[in-house]
Image: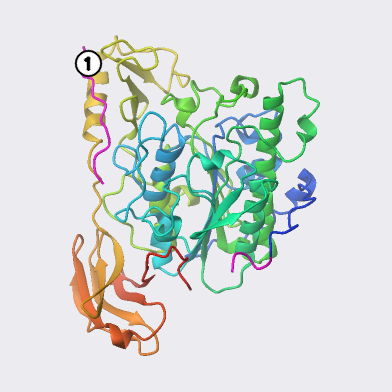
Amino acid sequence: MLPFVINAPSRRAFFAGTLAGTFAGVTLPAAADAADAFGAAAALPARPNFVVILADDLGWGEIGSQGQRLISTPNLDRLAAEGVRFETAYSGAPLCAPSRCALLTGLHAGHGTVRENPEGGPQRSLTGADLTFAELLQLSGYRTACIGKWGFGPELPGQDSHPNLRGFDEFFGYIGHVHAHQYFPKYLWHNGAKLRLDGKSYAPHLFRERAVEFIRQDGDDPFLLYYATNLPHSPSVIAGDAGRYESRPWSGPNRRHAAQVARLDNDVAALVRALRDAGVAERTLVLFTSDNGPHSEKGVTPELFDSNGPFRGDKRDVYEGGIRVPLIAWSPGLRARVVKQPVASWDVLPTLADLAGVPVPAQLDGHSFRGLLTGAGARKHDHLVWNRPRKAQAIRRGRWKAVRFAPHISGAGPEGRVELYDLAADPGERRDLAAARPELAEELLERLDRSIGEDPRVPYGLRSEIADGQVVVTLHNGSSVPWRSVRLGLDGPRELRSHPVERVDPGTAIAVGFPLAAAGRGRITARAEFDADGRSHVFRRRHHDTTGDAPAR
């Protein structure tokens, strides 16, 4: 009998205007109009803007560029045709919260803080020890926004899991996982406050309009927009009827699901059009992906749409259909190409850091795929891991994939079940080879077990605390290279600075205290200057209190 282990987690003024009447009579752009959002090529600069679009439960096969025939997605198809389409892209998990944690932090669900959804057990929240890609970019001068579904509780301001404390200057949307199921909510969160609604406003309308406003804001700083829509998650709710799908001979949920995907496609076009209108498209990289495979909830039948393409399973499954997702990278400076090398959502953080010129944190599970965007090639993963504690796990290494189910899960018996597949010959995972190749299955499972455990990261970034009449500024070098000529200080009228320190090695920190009285009035901003890998860097971080207010800039 092959070994069986399922590991549990270890430690670890609103808009420029008013919402009243803003969205009455909103008309979705026609496909022909939406296509006008795209245009000519330009070079992708260092430190580009980033727009990371995360769909909710969109299957690998639900867009036309990957074989969809019943639902029209002309705008995503054009992104794929003009940009880089990753044919073998994986989500961090087969369901929402752990997948989003992997995307944000660069750790797979065997190491990340959040390893499961609320169902079947408590869902953990992000902590002060978690470093998101927003925090990393915010430190280096990006203005940042999270719009849409955050997905990690609790629904309280000023706590470590709130988006404002995890690197986002602005947050507008749902904090909690379950609240995001309401398409016509009675409230949404704007930073640390609840924004009361009348229950008649369609949340995706609000998200799109706010995202467009964020893109159009003036400023010299580069920006990060994390657009985490709740489309096309169940329930299948759309504003109005199902449009072109209303007359299709399908069930009501399936018609509305198709309309949700079409709405998502048009929302993407609206964001790209905003980039064009603001004159920043040539300086922006757009990444589009999904948090997991397609759902089969509340009457939606993914088989009708072939939502998972040639793959087995859907949402919640660690089979390919539950974890294979679309991934498209678009910028006018990119050459069109299709990438077959496997990548995973935990590669996004190191990729954004690499492109922004920020020292990449050490001890991540992800690798930068920057070279795959340019055709230069990138480091390959030795293996990829998915972990659903007490339920199921999977590991892919090369062409081979092992799947392990806990006792009494998915038809497994009291001792669980192990399966082995050759993805090169059998991408649909139909022929279980575990009995024929037990030694290979055991080798993969041993590697899987070694990949699950404590969070391996070391502290990274800039912190400040007030103690004994001082503002103590601490810089943690959580990268893999030395930081040299380090100088800490406080921004303000007097621009307090320490004497430079020659070197701060990886895994170590330096702290300097400044008199609180000398810091002046108002919000306190810590500052660090240093050199790394031949580049000069400046980190800034606002001192956070516990009010839940958005950091001022």
Question: Does residue 470 sit above or below 52 in this rendering?
Answer: below
Evaluate whether residue 267 shows in this view: yes
Count of numbered circles in the view: 1
Segment tinted magenta in the rendering: 1-17
Tell me where residue 382 appears, x and y as whole percent: 30, 37
Q: Which residue does the image show at 34% across and 16% down from the upper left? A: 419
Question: What is the basis of the colouring in this image?
Answer: rainbow
| Quadrant of res 19 | bottom right
Q: Which residue is drawn at the image coordinates 54% and 74% (left, top)?
A: 220
Q: Amino acid at mark 1?
A: Leu
Q: Dot 1, crowdedness within 10 Å: few (<14), some or many (≥20)? A: some
Q: Is residue 231 left or right of residue 71?
A: left
**Left or right: 179 in relation to 130:** right
Circle 1 SS class? loop
Q: Residue at x 21, y 27 (%)?
A: 446
Which of 286/335 is in front?
286
**Overall secondary structure of the magenta stretch?**
loop
Would residue 350 appear left or right of 41 to someone viewing this image? left
**Is 8 part of what is drawn in magenta?**
yes
Q: Which residue is mark 1?
A: 2
Q: Residue at x 62, y 24 (%)?
A: 300
Q: Is residue 368 visible?
A: no
Image quadrant where one finds the N terminus: top left
Q: Is residue 375 above or below residue 487?
A: above
Question: In the image, residue 347 lies at what x, y percent?
Answer: 40, 46
Residue 387 is inside the magenta segment: no
Q: Quadrant of residue 451?
A: top left
Above or below for 380 versus 510: above
* Picture coordinates of residue 378, whole percent (x, y): 39, 47
Q: Position of residue 84 (x, y in %)?
A: 55, 45
Please identify the residue farthest to the bottom as the structure is shown.
494
